[in-house]
Image (tube, rainbow, N blue to C red):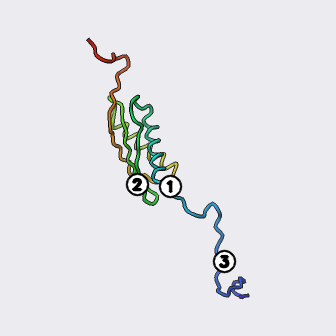
Amino acid sequence: MSADTGTGTGTGRQPPALVQPGERGALRIADRVVAKIAAQAAREALAPLPEDAAPPHATVVLRHDTARVRVLLELGYPGDIGARCAAVRRHVVERVGALVSMEVPEVTVQVERLHLTPAPGAPHGRTP
């Protein structure tokens, strides 16, 4: 047995420190998971969606602990398109950050289609 470490190896090295089970390994979250979270966050920010609108769709590019997000959506018209898109951006950043601990430096919102939403009490169809 070696006098310098007591390990019997004679190398003079200390045994490696024990790493707690919860701190071992790595975590990898798939792009499609982050995209689903972003799409759901966009849905939450836009609720309620126009009746015939497709639900929001998102794609992401992940690099290290950052996610760049692109959200495609359909909005009701008339409405404040800029404010609705800003609300989507804010909510996507908040939800992705909270749920997967990723920084979201960029959320691109692409409005694919506008759906005419008649004013309450307005006649539908043709008027004489």
- Per the rendering, the mark at residue 29 is 1
Determine the secondary structure under disc 2. Answer: strand
The image quadrant where one finds the C terminus is: top left
Q: Nearer the viewer, residue 109 or 98?
A: 109
Instruction: Identify whether 17 is placed above or below 60.
Output: below
Foreground tag (3 vs 2): 2
Q: Give percent across and percent down for residue 117.
A: 35, 26
Please report whichever mark, 2 or 1, sits nearer to the chain's N-terminal start: 1
Instruction: Identify whether 30 is placed above or below 7.
Output: above
Which residue type carries mark 2?
Val
| Residue displayed at 48% across by 48% down | 96
| Residue corresponding to mark 3 | 15
Residue 89, image quadrant: top left
Instruction: Identify whether 124 is placed above or below 8.
Output: above
| Residue displayed at 65% across by 62% down | 21
Residue 54, image quadrant: top left
Whether pointer 3 and pointer 2 mark residues with C-beta atoms closer than 8 Å, the reply is no
Q: Nearer the viewer, residue 101 or 28?
A: 28
Whole-number angstrom distance, CA of label 3 to CA of label 1: 33 Å
Determine the secondary structure under disc 3. Answer: loop
Q: Give percent across and percent down for residue 22.
A: 63, 60
Which residue type carries mark 3?
Pro
| Residue corresponding to mark 2 | 61
Instruction: Identify whether 127 is placed above or below 69.
Output: above
Please report whichever mark, 3 or 1, sits nearer to the chain's N-terminal start: 3
